[in-house]
Amino acid sequence: MKHKGIICGILAAVCYGTNPFGALPLYEEGVNTSSVLFYRFSMAVLMLAVMLLVERNSFRISGRELKTLGSLGLLFAASSITYYQSFRFMDAGIASTILFVYPVMVAVIMATCFRERVTVSTVTAIILALAGIGLLYRGDAGVPISATGVLLVMVSSLTYAVYIVVVNQSSIRMSSLKLTFYVLLICMLSLLAYSFTSPDLHLMLPPSPRAWFFACWLGLVPTVLSLVLMTVSVHEVGATPTAIMGALEPLTAVAIGVMVFDESLTFHLVVGIVLILSAVLLIVLGKDFHLRTISHTINVIVRKTWRWKS
């Protein structure tokens, strides 16, 4: 695997994991879902257009490229709408936990449709990541999970998985900036149409400077940076490894909670973090890394952490 693709995959996951950090403050100020997403994508499109102009990159595309870019834009719009809507029915933490079934979906699609060989290290990495993310969730015991919320996240996960596969399998050859610009432009136009489907989904202006800041944050970090880096990673190392490195997304949310909002660092969280990092490490090192080494590393870190917490 190429180091460039691995680094980009890790950074893409970390950037995408800051979605709740930008979306939840906007919800707190009364901004509806369609408006949050519209400003996220419109800010991103504006930023990418400026970057393309600075680089003197042509905006011209062919009809064949437009069809593929249109499909990618609609897939990403559907994934974003359903994911953000799920925040209305469940905690962002459990939504991001359920969302992580998408690497499994990517692996299944690649294996069944494109005959990609599923290795022992890939399966082990997925299991470690799923177990780790399960430990990251800190919900209220006994509180039922919304079936509507689960359905929304599952649709989001599936459409995002298909998006990654299409990026990997498409024959489009253009810069990551240009590809992301058109994908997000189509996303933005789709959201404009979506906002007219119900009177409750009208577009709202951000009500304060703080809201404008978080709208710009959503446009830059979990959108422009994440998608550009993810596109590079998919082309360099493949769809399945990039998807598995996405386990760092919910880990990022936990890290923000601990460092920014002074949330407690429990033993379960530490074990979950270790499992996720082990999954990413297994993907990074691939066949050259023995499963026995991972097991030994997990045991050592967990024992030391337990002594530290005691």
Image (spheres, rainbow, N blue to C red):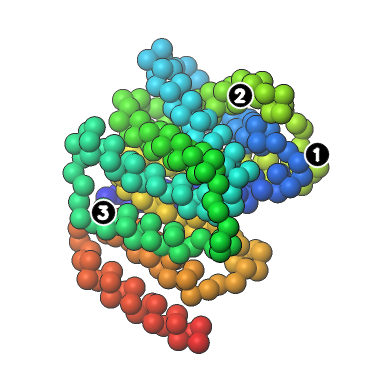
* Mark whose residue sits in front, 1 or 3: 3
**Whole-percent x, y for residue 294 in the image:** 28, 69
Where on the picture, by quarter, is residue 62?
top left
**Whole-percent x, y for residue 117 in the image:** 18, 44
* Mark whose residue sits in front, 2 or 1: 2
Q: Secondary structure at mark 2?
A: helix
Which three-letter amino acid code belongs to the residue tagged 1? Pro
Q: Secondary structure at mark 3?
A: helix
**Residue shown at 45% from the left, 80% from the top:** 305
Please tell me whether residue 295 is drawn above or below residue 36 in the rendered image.
Answer: below
Front residue of 285/32: it is: 32
**Residue shown at 38% from the left, 52% from the top:** 245
Disc with the residue nearer the chain's start (2 vs 1): 2
**Residue shown at 23% from the left, 56% from the top:** 121
* Crowding near the residue tagged with mark 3, few <14, some 14–19, many ≥20 C-alpha atoms within 10 Å: some
Which three-letter amino acid code belongs to the residue tagged 2? Tyr
**Residue shown at 38% from the left, 61% from the top:** 131
Front residue of 91/217: it is: 91
Viewer can see residue 185? no
Q: How many marks?
A: 3
Q: Is residue 152 left or right of residue 296?
A: right
Between the C-alphas of marks 3 and 2, the distance is: 38 Å
* Crowding near the residue tagged with mark 2, few <14, some 14–19, many ≥20 C-alpha atoms within 10 Å: some
Which three-letter amino acid code belongs to the residue tagged 3? Val
**Whole-percent x, y for residue 289 in the image:** 23, 64
Which of the labelled discs sits on residue 207, or is there none?
A: 1
Which residue, given by chain and number where applicable, does mark 2 sit on?
194
Q: Is residue 4 left or right of residue 74?
A: left
Q: Pointer 3 and pointer 2: residues touching (CB < 8 Å)?
A: no
Which residue, given by chain and number where applicable, does mark 3 sit on?
123
